[in-house]
Image: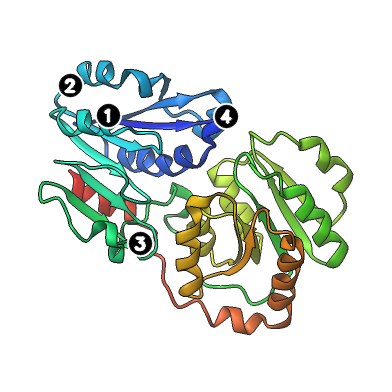
Amino acid sequence: MLRYIILTEGGGKYGLGHVARCISFYDAIEQQGDDVAFVIQGDRSVDKLIGNRKVFFKDWHSNLSEILENISKSSAIIVDSYYLSQMDADLLSSCGVKVLIIEDFLRLNYTDTTIVDWSLGAEYLSCYSNKEKTNTYLLGTTYLALRKPFWNVATEGRNSYNSLLITMGGSDIRKLSSSLLSSIKCNFPYLHINVVIGPSFENISEFQDLKMDNVDMYFSPNEEEMCEIMAQSDFAISGGGQTLYELYAMGLSIIAIELIENQHDELKKWKEYSMLQFAGKWNDSNLLERVNESISKHLDCSDCFMSRRKQPIDTKGVFRILNSFN
């Protein structure tokens, strides 16, 4: 039996995205009968997301060498981090156990490592053109790791657009959800709106005055609840990142907003593949106007958007990763 350690960060300044996508690995590893635990750099705001899974909170950014000294040779390490240094990448490469790195862009040099990047079109990125021969590269949506509730979902699109989902991540770092909700309520009063309010929102009080019969607010939903909310929705307004893949797997049409700079290239690729409507960047002066225009296009031409769903999403990529890694 292997013992897997998942090194990542979450909560506070780190957000929740890395922990959320690592949950898919935890659940798949547990299902295949191996031992697994999280080691998280962050705070307890991730508790509801983690649920009953085994977790240790440690400053591994500063003490990675100490952690590596205390793991057995029958272990395997999975790392999902934007804060990993080249020094720590070198430590991992030479630690004597299997190492898998989840990448969104190849910013560090690795050896004797499995590198997975399941972003759309990753297999064609120039950063992977000169591959290090000692590494294994798992690239593209064939290796997409979705959370457990999304492993067996239907991927058909919707027949109409009556229910809109707003999801801006676990912390809504740009505090857009309340302004989006207010604007959409005003311009489309007949739409049913589902709003996800994450555990790290700092402006929850702003939503009190926005409650009404056709608005449902969901506070800190776990992955099963999030899957159900998506199932009850027809289309969505979302930031970039892993949520895009879950929405697409659930058959929702997507209106996307770029929340942080490192989402730019992937959103551009999604747009090129006609897999979403891009409304703009979070700080665009006309963002709300463009969001409303995108909603109008969906309502006026629902058949057009349904016909665009030409790119299938493989929901079992996490098992393909583990089979290649073991």
Depth order, front residue of 229/299: 299
Q: What residue sits right under mark 3 in the picture?
A: 141
Numbered label attached to residue 232: none
Residue plotted at (50% across, 42% down) = 17
Numbered label attached to residue 12: 4
Q: What residue sits right under mark 1 in the picture?
A: 88
User: Residue 20's x, y, as percent?
Assistant: 48, 41
Task: Kindly indicate the quadrant of the structure image that contains residue 162.
Answer: bottom right
Mark 1 vs mark 3: give the one in front: 1
- Label 4 amino acid? Gly
Whichever of callouts 3 and 4 sits on the residue coming sooner in the sequence is 4
Whichever of callouts 4 and 1 sits on the residue coming sooner in the sequence is 4
- Label 2 amino acid? Ser
Mark 4 vs mark 1: give the one in front: 1
The secondary element bearing badge 1 is classed as helix
Whichever of callouts 4 and 2 sits on the residue coming sooner in the sequence is 4
Circle 3: is it few (<14), some (14-19), or many (20+) Cα within 10 Å? Answer: many
Question: How many angstroms separate mark 3 from mark 4 (CA)?
Answer: 29 Å
Circle 2: is it few (<14), some (14-19), or many (20+) Cα within 10 Å? Answer: few
Q: Is residue 189 visible?
A: no
The quadrant of the rendering that contains the N terminus is: top left
Whichever of callouts 2 and 3 sits on the residue coming sooner in the sequence is 2
Mark 3 vs mark 4: give the one in front: 4
- Label 3 amino acid? Thr
Q: What residue sits right under mark 2 in the picture?
A: 72
The secondary element bearing badge 2 is classed as loop
The secondary element bearing badge 4 is classed as helix
Question: How many angstroms separate mark 4 from mark 1 (CA)?
Answer: 22 Å
The quadrant of the rendering that contains the C terminus is: top left
